[in-house]
């Protein structure tokens, strides 16, 4: 797998989709996008969902907030992202799920590690592009793209740290506190 080309494809697709979303919703304040719903089994590897949310769609109730909970965001799955990346995931499925039975576990572990690294790089690259104003001028200066994969339990904090540049993390309202809460539990 050409992981560099894979990352560029995700970056370009993600930037285009977020640009289209921002243009279609003038006056909405998109504060974040996130990758979640990572799925791979012994037969299929699917693109993670790209989600996006606006400040107006954040709900807070008795200490619970949807700010970093993509399944509860306004756009919890932007179908265009998965559609655009489907050929890449078809290739991943063929490449990583083809090894002989004795090698399948090792191949799956290698894929998960490489995919996590690639997706973390994609998050950082899209965040940088957005903060430079090269996606849409309406995106705020603290806009971030992050991996928020609650299904991976103890790994979620690590995935957040890997997907957000440490210099950017303190500039994202609430993300540092959310990360601290994850690490304490």
Image (cartoon, grey):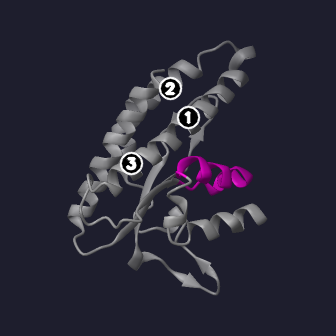
Residue 135 in view here: yes
Q: Nearer the viewer, residue 160 or 133?
A: 133
Q: Which residue is mark 3?
A: 126
Percent from the top left, x then y, of residue 105?
Answer: 72, 24
Does residue 185 appear to the left or right of 78 in the view shown?
right
Residue 26 image offset from top left, x and y in percent: 22, 71
Q: Which residue does the numbered mark 1 point to in the structure image? A: 115
| Residue under the image location 59 percent in, 47 percent down | 162
Check if residue 13 falls in the magenta segment: no
Range of the magenta residues? 147-165
* Residue at x 28%, y 60% (from the top left corner): 21
Q: Which residue is mark 2?
A: 92
- Residue 152 badge: none
Which dot, 2 or 3, sits closer to the camera?
3
Q: Is residue 185 visible?
A: no
Whole-number angstrom distance, CA of label 2 to CA of label 3:
22 Å
Q: Residue at x 54, y 73 (%)?
A: 66
Residue 99 place in picture, x, y as percent:
63, 14
Tell me: residue 51, above or below residue 96: below
Kindly check if marks 1 and 2 are in contact, taking CB atoms under 8 A apart as contact: yes
Pick the residue in front: 46 or 137.
137
Find the distance from the CA under tag 1 to the CA under tag 2.
10 Å
Neighbour tally class for label 1: few under 14, some 14-19, many 20 plus, Cα within 10 Å? some
Q: Which of the two labelled residues, at mark 2 and mark 3, occupies the earlier sequence position?
A: 2
Please identify the residue farthest to the right as the structure is shown: 185
Principal SS element in the magenta part?
helix
Label 2's element? helix
Return the x and y of residue 167 as percentages of the image width and height: 52, 56
């Amino acid at each position: 797998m050409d992981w560099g080309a894979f990352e560029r494809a995700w970056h370009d697709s993600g930037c285009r989709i977020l640009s289209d979303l921002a243009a279609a919703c003038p006056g909405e304040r998109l504060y974040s996008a996130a990758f979640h719903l990572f799925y791979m089994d012994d037969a299929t590897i699917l693109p993670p969902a790209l989600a996006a949310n606006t400040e107006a769609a954040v709900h807070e109730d008795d200490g619970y907030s949807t700010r970093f909970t993509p399944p509860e965001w306004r756009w919890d799955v932007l179908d265009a992202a998965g559609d655009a990346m489907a050929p890449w995931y078809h290739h991943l499925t063929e490449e990583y799920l083809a090894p002989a039975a004795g090698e399948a576990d090792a191949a799956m572990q290698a894929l998960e590690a490489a995919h996590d690294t690639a997706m973390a790089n994609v998050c950082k690259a899209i965040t940088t592009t957005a903060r430079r104003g090269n996606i849409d001028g309406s995106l705020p200066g603290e806009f971030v793209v992050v991996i928020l994969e609650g299904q991976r339990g103890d790994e979620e904090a690590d995935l957040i740290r890997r997907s957000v540049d440490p210099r950017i993390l303190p500039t994202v309202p609430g993300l540092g506190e959310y990360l601290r809460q994850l690490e304490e539990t």
